[in-house]
């Protein structure tokens, strides 16, 4: 027994060292982008086993990232990191007191963008994100509620209490193809914010420790990464193998779900528009001659318009941008570029300034 305890301590020493490094070193030491460095993956009530209680849980970390921070980091794209194709760029991240990536502003937003990593602005600096461009270049106060879906939006206390006039539901093409669950009237409210600075520091520390980003970092150093799919300096996530196209009945189900969400939002005085960001495999289809034809976007657009839902066009703009020598998507990343964001912002602003009622 006397020999066992020292051996166990020696065995646990590397893990204890990693835990210590996670806490003591700068947040971004083991992350190739800010997203991983400041993400909130689990909250205190989750860590102590209260996650499945159907009550509005309270937390000091209500958003997806650590609140009230400003971070500056040299990042590389999610496809190119740890490869010769990586393109370093200096990125500024700022979060508000609720932990969403937006410049703190007490103004009630006119538009809430419910979206995924495109809305967050992965690979982009703060001033290049969709909400910031809408605010700065088009005079529309916009809030990026992302990453989130429409069910999360309906369950979030703030948007129940302060519904905005407009909501844009943004999603990447490959995620849009997977469909959208219909509204769940019995879904419990999302956790409410609890103001306690000391408890917040505890939650932040627990998040950093339990995620252990350093493990993934060491694995990448030791094992390397799977070579990315590269065509003429452009990196792709799926390449020629982009998966099966949804069937017409699947698209019909997606549209019915969106109609149900739109009806709920109308009762709150909110108009809904749909924005689908084309995959790189779509915009750069000429670089993937072996890929099957892609018809999802045209079918989805057609069915949404038949259902009197608003479609914010972007696919044709991305193709036109390429023809004009502009890159609507980042070369070493799956996400849109600053130019692609400006194209989307222009189209969203047109919809709002035109009265936002017409599909």
Image: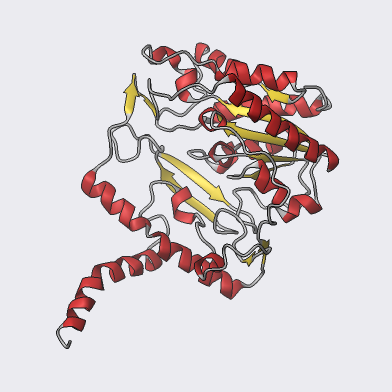
Is residue 142 in sight in this rendering?
A: yes
Furthest residue in direction front, as rendered: 249
Write down the quadrant of residue 351 in the picture.
top right
Number of numbered discs present?
0
Write down the quadrant of residue 214 in the picture.
bottom left
What residue is rendered at 80% in x and 46% in y? 163
- Image spot of residue 213 (x, y percent): 37, 56
Q: Is 195 on the left or on the right of 24, as rendered?
A: right
What residue is rendered at 38% in x and 15% in y? 288
- Image spot of residue 7 (x, y percent): 17, 78
Write down the quadrant of residue 139 in the picture.
top right
Does residue 240 sit above or below 171 in this rendering?
A: above
Does residue 264 sit above or below 279 in this rendering?
A: below
- Which of 193 and 69 lies nearest the eye of the viewer? 193
Q: Is 47 on the left or on the right of 298, as rendered?
A: left
Is residue 139 in sight in this rendering?
A: no
Q: Quadrant of the N terminus?
A: bottom left
Does residue 167 sit above or below 193 in this rendering?
A: above
- Image spot of residue 44 (x, y percent): 54, 68
- Image spot of residue 16 (x, y percent): 30, 71
Furthest residue in direction bottom, as rendered: 2
Q: Quadrant of the C terminus?
A: top right
Furthest residue in direction left, as rendered: 3
Does residue 133 sit above or below 163 in this rendering?
A: above
- Which of 40 and 247 lies nearest the eye of the viewer? 247
């Amino acid at each position: 027994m006397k020999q066992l305890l020292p051996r166990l301590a020696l065995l646990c020493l590397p893990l204890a060292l990693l835990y210590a490094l996670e806490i003591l070193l700068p947040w971004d030491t083991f992350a190739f982008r800010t997203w991983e460095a400041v993400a909130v993956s689990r909250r205190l009530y989750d860590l102590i086993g209260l996650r499945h209680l159907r009550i509005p849980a309270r937390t000091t970390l209500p958003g997806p990232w650590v609140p009230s921070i400003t971070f500056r980091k040299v990042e590389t794209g999610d496809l190119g990191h740890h490869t010769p194709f990586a393109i370093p760029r200096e990125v500024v991240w700022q979060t508000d007191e609720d932990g969403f990536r937006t410049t703190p502003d007490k103004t009630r937003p006119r538009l809430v963008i419910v979206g995924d990593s495109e809305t967050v602005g992965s690979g982009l600096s703060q001033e290049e994100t969709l909400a910031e461009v809408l605010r700065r270049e088009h005079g529309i106060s916009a809030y990026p509620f992302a990453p989130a879906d429409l069910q999360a939006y309906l369950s979030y206390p703030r948007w129940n209490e302060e519904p905005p006039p407009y909501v844009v539901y943004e999603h990447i093409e490959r995620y849009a193809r997977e469909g959208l669950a219909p509204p769940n009237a019995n879904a419990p409210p999302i956790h409410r914010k609890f103001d306690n600075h000391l408890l917040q520091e505890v939650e932040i520390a627990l998040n950093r420790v339990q995620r252990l980003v350093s493990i993934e970092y060491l694995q990448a150093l030791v094992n390397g990464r799977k070579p990315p799919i590269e065509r003429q300096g452009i990196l792709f996530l799926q390449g020629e193998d982009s998966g099966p196209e949804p069937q017409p009945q699947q698209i019909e189900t997606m549209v019915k779900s969106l109609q149900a969400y739109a009806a709920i939002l109308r009762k709150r005085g909110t108009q809904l528009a749909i924005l689908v960001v084309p995959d790189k495999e779509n915009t750069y289809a000429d670089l993937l001659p072996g890929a099957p034809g892609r018809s999802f976007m045209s079918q989805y657009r057609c069915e949404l318009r038949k259902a009197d839902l608003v479609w914010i066009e972007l696919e044709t703009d991305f193709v036109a941008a390429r023809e004009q020598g502009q890159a609507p998507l980042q070369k070493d990343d799956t996400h849109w570029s600053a130019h692609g964001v400006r194209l989307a912002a222009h189209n969203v602003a047109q919809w709002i300034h035109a009265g936002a009622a017409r599909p």
